[in-house]
Image: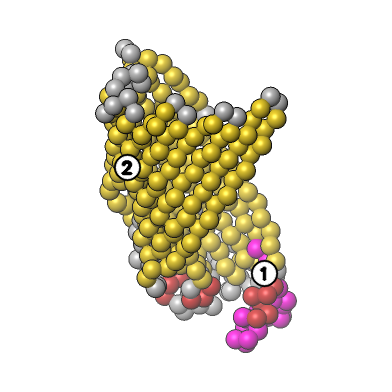
Amino acid sequence: ALTIEGKIGNWDMTLAGGHLRRKTLTESDYSDYSYFYDAIYGSSWVDNGGNTISPNQYVQGIDRYRKSFAEFRVSSPQDASLRFIGGLFWQRQSHNIEQNYIIDNLSDVSAVPGTGDNIWLTKQQRTDRDYAAFGELSFDVTDQLTLTGGARLYKYDNSLVGFFGYNNPGYSGNPTYLCQGPAIVDGSPCTNVNKSTSDTDSIFKVNATYKINDDALVYATWSRGFRPGGINRRGSLPPYGADELDNYELGWKTNFGAFRFNGAVYQLDWNNIQLSFLGANGLTEIRNAGIARIRGAEIDVGYRAGGFTLNAGMSYNDAEIRRDF
């Protein structure tokens, strides 16, 4: 990561960026699937000589993550009654997914081509791209009252490409797993998922802060957040869209000598919730589900004198689904 700070005239400038690479290796047992799915449906596995083999499955996985981001931000002099902060943001994340579901000595007829003993292979590349322009304007109406408004224009462009499934034609006649074209992701026999989703939208924020005195202030905020949509790997399912969270909040921040007392009450309205669950054939699906409302309060208190510090916090939330999915 790297951060550069400087000046453009009397405006502050910040340029920040970073890059992450991470690789994880996993091994897990999958025998429960063999005994409680394959056995029930009468499946039996053989080697190349036609001899019955143990159906025990295990999974060897490799996940390769990359993430790069950059942000440019400028801010006007903060001692002025009218202040501005604005900038640009870019981010690219990728996830190379490899999951090998292995039955030792599996026949070539049943194995996914090019994998040896794989009864199932997931070999996919997920790429998430985010772009944004943002700005915030604050104005001191009086020495005590400040109003702030902000906006963020964003665009996301997410894609998923690769292969998941059994050997086709072969064990499975399910059209979900049938090849649609030649391999795009290295290490896959073909491509049976190649989808993307994108959207452009905006979110906003409004805040009012009132300073009662040098030791106490109250504030009110409305703000909106979001999570970008994405792709379901089951080809018959549509992409899922963004979900949004509206926050309505009233709060206070105070100091009384050595004592600190902060708190807030709030309501969150969560729309088009991204719900993840296991669908048919044990494949994870993500759908935009119902609406939730969360009402709550939080309190933060503290005492500091000499070298002694004592802090305590409490929160209460009452969450309710407002529309069934």
Q: Amino acid at mark 2?
A: Lys
| Mark toward the viewer: 2 or 1 | 2
Numbered disc 1: secondary structure:
loop
Q: Quadrant of residue 29?
A: bottom right
Q: Nearer the viewer, residue 196 or 210?
A: 210
Q: In this rendering, would 188 be left or right of 201?
A: right
In the image, the segment drawn in magenta is 37-59
Q: Is residue 40 visible?
A: yes
| Dot 2 or dot 1, earlier in sequence | 1
Between 107 and 247, which is closer to the camera in this rendering? 247
Q: Is residue 285 magenta?
A: no
Residue closer to the observer: 165 or 134: 134
Q: Is residue 51 above or below residue 115?
A: below
Q: Which residue is mark 1?
A: 30
Please give the label number shown on residue 205. Answer: 2
Residue 206 image point, x, y percent: 31, 41
Quarter containing the C terminus: bottom left
The residue positioned farthest toward the top in the image shown: 9
